[in-house]
Amino acid sequence: MDTLKIVLQVICGLGILNVWLLRFAKDTPYRPESASNLPEEFAVYGLSEKALYAIGGAKILLACALIAGIWMPEIVDPSAWALAVLMAGAIFMHVKVQDPPRKSVPATGALLMSLAISVV
């Protein structure tokens, strides 16, 4: 089970870092409406630029904590739970703007991985 937990930590952590560091300004099929980057996506949700950077900073920090948790296991569960809360919020935002369910697939995957990390 330890190996599964570590694999989930790496996949989830790198996935979040990919979205927030590599794809921040890029279009993806998972963005709502006509948003072509994260700032536009947050605007569609009715969230401010401050919220964008606060949530993004928290997600980056938590993703790094999941990866660092390979060597510091005591930080894994709190980080996974906090990330799960943020991913639930992301799914809520997709529902709020009436996105089709497929747009929530990455957030749902990260939520499920975060929960699995916490219970493994």
Image (spheres, rainbow, N blue to C red):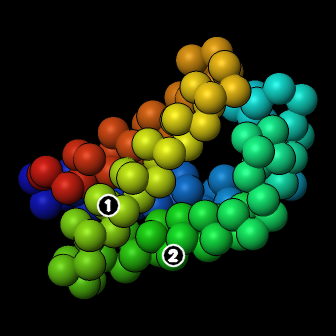
Mark 2: amino acid: Leu
- When the figure is inspected, residue 111 is found, relative to residue 59, above or below; the finding is above
Asked if residue 21 shows in the view, the reply is no
Asked if residue 42 shows in the view, the reply is yes
C-alpha separation, residue under disc 2 versus residue under disc 1:
11 Å
Mark 1: amino acid: Ala
Residue at the disc numbered 2? 61
Q: In this view, does 76 lie to the left or right of 102?
A: left
21 and 36: which one is in front? 36
- When the figure is inspected, residue 68 is found, relative to residue 110, above or below; the finding is below
The residue that appears at 40% across and 76% down in the rendered structure is 65
79 and 48: which one is in front? 48
Residue 95 position within the rendered picture, expressed as x and y whole percent measured from the top left? 58, 26
Q: Residue 80 carries which label?
A: 1
Q: Is mark 2 on a helix, strand or loop?
A: helix
Q: Which of marks 2 and 1 is nearer the N terminus?
A: 2
Q: In this view, does 14 lie to the left or right of 119?
A: right
The residue that appears at 44% across and 42% down in the rendered structure is 88
Q: Label 1: few (<14), some or many (≥20) within 10 Å?
A: many
Q: Are marks 2 and 1 in contact (CB under 8 Å)?
A: no
Residue 108 position within the rendered picture, expressed as x and y whole percent measured from the top left? 45, 34
